[in-house]
Amino acid sequence: MPVLLTTQLDRHSQLVATDRLSLTAEERSRSRHPHVTDGGREVYLQLKRGTNLRHGDRLQAAGSELVVEILAKPEQVMVVTAIQPLDLLQAVYHLGNRHVPLEITDDRLYLLPDPVLQDLLHQRGLQVLVVERPFQPQAGAYEATPHHHHH
């Protein structure tokens, strides 16, 4: 019988992970789903509906000392770059209008592979490569997010 993971720990919790669970971006958005941890344990996520897990989040099993750390699993993503920063900003605008999950950095966009969007981006003069890496899309506009500082 799978262990129920029901509690998302606060980022400041001192509890140490005893197992890990590698999930794709889509899997991290499912609040109720069975999985097998990296250590081979059957678990079932039973979290508040609408929970979006991030890399480094920790979950605790009900009535157990099991603490599972969430890892962003590498997956195929498109990496979008541009010669001019404005071209990248315009791409964010067009992709946002389509409600495409995006990971945005200073000089790159990351999104899940889609031939129609790849064609659109190429037509706009952007460079698109497909690579395998963890995908961590931006949280929605109304979702609370921690402030990240890149040095």
Image: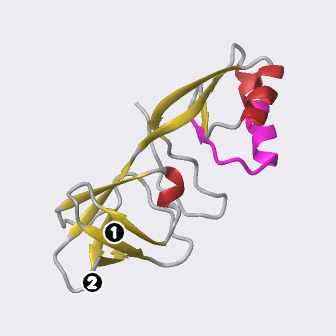
Q: Secondary structure at mark 1?
A: loop
The residue carrying mark 1 is 10
Where residue 80 sits, quadrant-wise, is top right
Where residue 39 sits, quadrant-wise, is bottom left
Characterize the local packing of mark 2: few (<14), some (14-19) or many (20 or more) Cα atoms within 10 angstroms: some
Rendered view: 80 above or below 134: above
Amino acid tagged 1: Asp
User: Where is residue 23 drawn, in percent x and y?
Assistant: 41, 53
The residue carrying mark 2 is 62
Toward the viewer: 128 or 141?
Answer: 128
Residue 103 covered by magenta stretch: yes
User: Where is residue 121 drawn, in percent x and y?
Assistant: 76, 27
- In the picture, measured across the screen, residue 66 lies left or right of residue 146, that is left
Q: Report the colour scheme.
A: secondary structure
Identity of the residue furthest to the top in this view: 83
- In the picture, measured across the screen, residue 2 lies left or right of residue 137, that is left
- In the picture, measured across the screen, residue 126 lies left or right of residue 63, that is right
Identity of the residue furthest to the bottom in this view: 63
| Circle count | 2
- Quarter holding the C terminus is top left
Characterize the local packing of mark 1: few (<14), some (14-19) or many (20 or more) Cα atoms within 10 angstroms: few
Q: Residue at x 77, y 21 (%)?
A: 122
Q: In the image, which residues are magenta?
A: 90-104
Q: Earlier in the sequence, mark 1 or mark 2?
A: 1
Q: Which mark is residue 45?
A: none
Where residue 127 sits, quadrant-wise, is top right
Residue 3 in view of the camera: yes
- In the picture, measured across the screen, residue 65 lies left or right of residue 22, that is left
- Cα separation, mark 1 vs mark 2, equals 15 Å
Q: Residue at x 35, y 60 (%)?
A: 57
Toward the viewer: 95 or 87?
Answer: 95
